[in-house]
Image (cartoon, coloured by chain):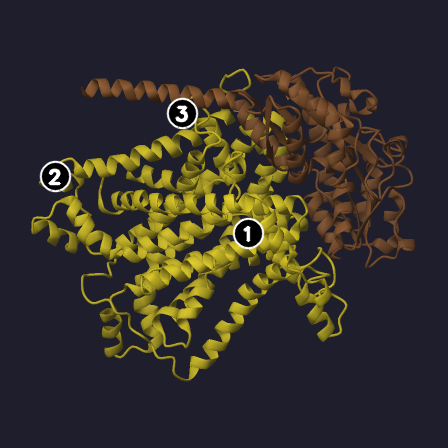
Amino acid sequence: MKGKKGIVILVTAFLAIAVISSGVYAKTPITIYSSVHEDVLAAIAKEFNKRTPDVELKYFRLGTTKIIAKVNAEVKAGGIRADVVWTAEPAYFEELKQRNLITKYLSPAAKGISKLFIDPDGYYIGARILSIGLTYNTKLVKEAEAPRDWNDLLDPKWKNQITHASPLYSGSATATVTGLTQTPAYGWAYYEKLRANGCTIARSQGATQRKVAGGEYKVGIGLDYGIRKMNAKGSPIQFVYPKSGTVTWGSPIAIVKASEHKEAAQKFIDFVLSPDGQKFLISQYIVSVNPKVASPKGAPPVLDILSKALPVDWDYLIKNREKLLKRFSKTMLE
Amino acid sequence: MINFRSITKGRKIGLGHFFMGVPALLLLLFVAFPISLIFFQSVLSEAGTLTIGFLEKVFEVKSNYMSLMNTLTISLLTVFFTILIGCPLAWLVTRTDMPFKGLFKTLFIIPYMIPPFIGAIAWGFLLSPRTGFVNKFLMALFNSSTPFFNIYTYEGVVFVMALYFYPYVFITVTGALERMDPTLEEAARSSGSGRFRVVRDITLPLVAPAIAAGVLLVFIAACSNFGIPALIGSEGRVYVLTTRIFYYIYSGGFEGLQMASSLSIFLVITSALALLANRWYLRKKQFTIIAGKSMRPNVVSLGKYRIPFLIGCSLFSFATMLAPLLCVVLISLLKAYGVDIAWKNLTLANYKYVLFEYELTRASMWNSIRLSLTAATFLTVIGSLIAYIIVRTKLTGRRILEFLSTLPYSIPGTVLAIGMILAFSGKFGINLYNTIWILLIAYTARYMAFAVKSVGASLEQVHMSLEEAARISGAGWGRTFRDIVVPLVKPGLIAAWFLAFMPMLRELTTSVLLFGPETRTIGVAVYEFQDAGYYESAAALATLVIIVIFAGNFLLKRITGGKFGF
């Protein structure tokens, strides 16, 4: 009797599990690792899940540095646990590509998006625009006196009043240093002069913003959307697109090679790049890569930004990362 | 010390073995295994062959040497100042008639409750050269244009660390003073020794093991801390091992993990040496203070110094705890970061957002609370057994157990987290990735050292004769442990539980790599706000965490009639 009862229970349990799991797996689950802000991801996920009822998108949000550490550890432990990765700067994706960890996908939604943001081999594509420019504290600096171009920071009136994020921690700061030092008009000489004018290195872009908004420093070099967001909330901080051009790049999105749900992942990338997906970025003051989407308040149209952008030589960064960071450490940190 | 064999020769043969074997196995599986995987990384090349290339490469870089030196000197200075602060304060709240000493006992552990990176931001608010409130005030007062303090210096790092870590010494020494046999001091007093001579000749030597335990925790905590050197040191161009390790993990690409592991070896060696030094020091001190008699502590009358001491303690509490705490609260009430502090700029909107609009607050609070409660209990039980093995037996390999129990705390949380991912992601048959279990294991392992040190120090003070008496009277090992050992080391157990519970409630560095879509913790939530530039929301959430800790502490104290809780 006892044995029979056991079998009945087992069979019922199996049936129950089968029923439950069939309900769950009617939807294809995909996971994205991203450094895009929580609010944006939540809104995008909600809309995407509504439009594509057969796919269930889960997101996992962390700062770029932490995502890279997590992904690298996952690779060592047997494989990336996400289907899509959307973060950081192109150099990291170039490394993922060379290690055969991401897969090719040319989205039809990429039409109209600048070639600058698309990997020529088709492995990744920029899905939001990040720009580095100048920033100042509006309580301490009048608009007329604010720096307008990179070289304005070298004015003695900003002596010991300048801050910049550290490329040892921040991916966007690495991009800044690559962009400025590889532009002949600036080069390493620019950083040497910044140091001579008392420029301090803060840890992250967040710290830079906080220090300028809090008045610890009057001016700085910072990331566009974070500053616009603080400004919109009422903080005394302003972003300036330098006259001779910003350091601009697209934060790439790519499909993980080991993903078991590539088709669903592709659908998601199509949605993110489309005007309907990109419009969610605007609420966080991020500029869209899609020229059809209007820029957030206070930012010029994407094509204007691009026409003046200082190019970042990612290939140089990939090949010379160590050299670049060493030189930066020597110039600014020691 | 007794022979281990004799323990198991009671009626319950094997019980002792079982109780000692289990913690050893747990340590091997959940500490030795993941951490050894990390170290394999540093000696394995891409192709899987053995290499010392990464170790050599680490030695080549001058900044790595400099950061090693900084780590050592900063940690030693921190130790020095924590003793200087922690011991007198512990004495004041336990052994004197200072007014409000119960209140101060709670106040003095506040620094321990504030998340380090929030604390570092608050100190920046107070002491940054140009905008720090204290600097502005002093500059206005003395009509000076040069700031008085600059927190972003080497000294600044030591200052914040000392204020952050002295509670370790304070808590362990308070525990020791409370359960010290007062007759020893009475004897000295009646033989004609002065008040301070008693402290010097009797009290201080007797609490030495507790001070040593606290010091070891401080030293290891200072070596492996990331938040303070990252937020305060880096700005002043002061680098330590943990900030270098973080840099390699992030910026070094795939090779970075190997470089980071190689650099972590320095931290492991440092903490192993610290353990040995601690051992060597304690070997010469075979004091037992609790011999089974009454344990009401002896109260010293401060006489005419009562009020000056009260004022001193109040000023110290205000300057070092309430000021940064008020800073956090103030930021949480601001409409936007950087606006003037005026009534019109204050708002409760951040609290409203955090409590009612941000969906993840409640889930992450619940995750952190259940994780901390479970992990604190686990590690107190396992840690006590390990402490017992270390202190009371001559078992071969007990020093290895001690080293293993301290190891997870002596390496940066990030490195430990990576070890956990490597070990428990299914590659070796155990898949706990993205579940709450991997967090529970990491928390338990990381704070195990607290229980081992705290309970170990208590055990050192309990004389063997009590256990021997119990066994002679026929009690088995288990009964002796339950009826004699546990009640006597209870203050140590409670201290261990609290020492671990509070930092776990706001744990960040390991959680941030181990949490999954459904297991977000409160530390991660605060960090995420900060990372996204919502400093006011981060401060509001941090304030809520501090309130929860206070409330929990208060409740515990109320329910247990003042026996538990600080």
Relative vertical location of residue B341 with respect to residue B357 in this rendering, above or below: below
Name the chain under label 2: B
Within 10 Å of the Cα at label 2, are there few (<14), some (14-19), or many (20+) other Cα atoms? some
Label located before the other in sequence (3 or 2): 2
Q: Residue B71: x and y, percent? A: 54, 46
Can you tell which of label 3 and label 2 is closer to the viewer? 3
Q: Is residue A319 visible?
A: no
Give the colour of chain A: brown
Q: Is residue B433 visible?
A: yes
Instruction: Specify the chain shown as yellow.
Output: B
Q: Residue B191: x and y, percent? A: 23, 77
Q: Secondary structure at mark 1?
A: helix
Is B457 situated left or right of A145 in this image?
Answer: left
Q: Do marks 3 and 2 share a chain?
A: yes
Q: Which mark is residue B430?
A: 3
Name the chain under label 3: B
Label located before the other in sequence (3 or 1): 1
* The residue positioned farthest toward the left in the image shown: B473
Residue at point 49%, 22% (across, down): A23
Marks 1 & 2, CB-CB < 8 Å contact: no
Q: Residue A169: x and y, percent? A: 66, 39
Distance Cα–Cα, label 3 vs label 2: 34 Å
Can you tell which of label 3 and label 1 is closer to the viewer? 3
**Which residue matches tag 2?**
B12
The amino acid on which the numbered mark 3 sits, given as a three-letter code, is Ile
